[in-house]
Image: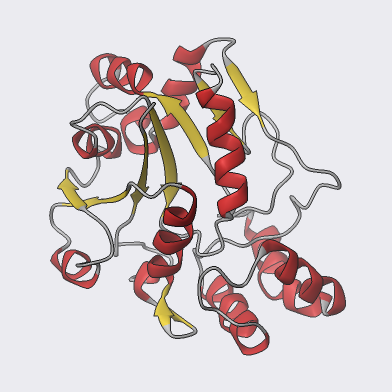
Amino acid sequence: MKVVAVIQARTGSTRLPGKVLKPIGKHPALYHTVRRTQAAVPDTRICIPHNDPVLFDAVKGWAPTIRGPAADVLYRYYMAVPDKPTVIVRITGDCPLVDPDVVREVVDRCVRGMAYSSNVFPTRTYPEGLDVEAFRFGLLEAAVRSAAAQDYDREHVTPLIRRLAGTSVECVHQKPSYAHYRWTLDTATDYEFFTTLAEHLEFEPPHPTTAEVLALLEAHPEIARINTETAHAYGGA
């Protein structure tokens, strides 16, 4: 059974332009996402907009890189898997702390028969930024065929895939819930959060681990407040 991970990334973020290339420790944020994903899924690919030459040059040598429509991210995923793997893992480039163990667990649910599995739907218990989704190639193919042009489903990839999966959906949970933590890179305060982490922890993949980050935040809750209070003020990402 062939499993492929596809990381979507772009430099054109409106809230934090160039966010995926901002350094965290010694490396750009996206480098961390790629290396940590590869630890769980060796066949990891990056899909970027065709009009993003800066990003294309920056990621050379990290992983196979596919360029496609800027707005049609769904079709970009389809372009990234011409070999039609059994399972596709979706990771977004703004998740530099993605956990290889969580990736493996989500993938395992899909490999064992689920059409779609994740740790975010329908209920999140992991920090925002450890998001992993896995789905069968047939669902992606069906979504590409049925999604309307310029549709929400083409920009956001998995809402239609979830609907097409019907009841063959499974969500990985953890106890206690850490959903109140924000480990995604989308705003200036998110970046401050990550640079502060890098002052306290080794940021060389596979470190820091989820356990290391949790231990630091439990000892220093003021670090977690750097970006969670701002996120709550404007309603999240």
Count of marks placed on residues: 0
Q: Residue at x 59, y 55 (%)?
A: 99
- Looking at the picture, tell me which residue is in the foreground, 36 or 127: 36
In the image, what residue occupies the spot 23% across and 39% down? 80
Q: Quadrant of residue 140?
A: top left
Q: Visible in this render: residue 137?
A: yes
Name the spot of residue 15 as percent of width and height, x first.
43, 65
Q: Is residue 151 above or below residue 128?
A: above
Quadrant housing the N terminus: top left
Name the residue nearer the viewer: 27 or 76: 27
On the rendered structure, is 196 left or right of 25?
right
**Which residue in the rendered view is the most extreme toward the top?**
167
Q: Is residue 186 above or below residue 223?
A: above
| Residue found at the very far bottom of the displayed protein | 199
Name which residue lies at 60% across and 82% down. Answer: 202
Can you see residue 16? Answer: no
Q: Is residue 1 left or right of residue 225?
A: left
x, y (%) of residue 88? 39, 33
Residue drawn at x 59%, y 83% as measured from the top left: 198
Q: Is residue 57 above or below residue 137?
A: below
Q: Residue furthest front?
A: 1
Q: Which percent across, then down, holds residue 227?
A: 66, 70
For the C terminus, give its image quadrant. bottom right
Of residue 76 and residue 36, the one placed in the foreground of this image is 36
In this picture the colour scheme is secondary structure
Query: Percent x, y for residue 11?
Result: 29, 65
- Does 154 appear above or below 129? above
Quarter of the image holding residue 69?
top left
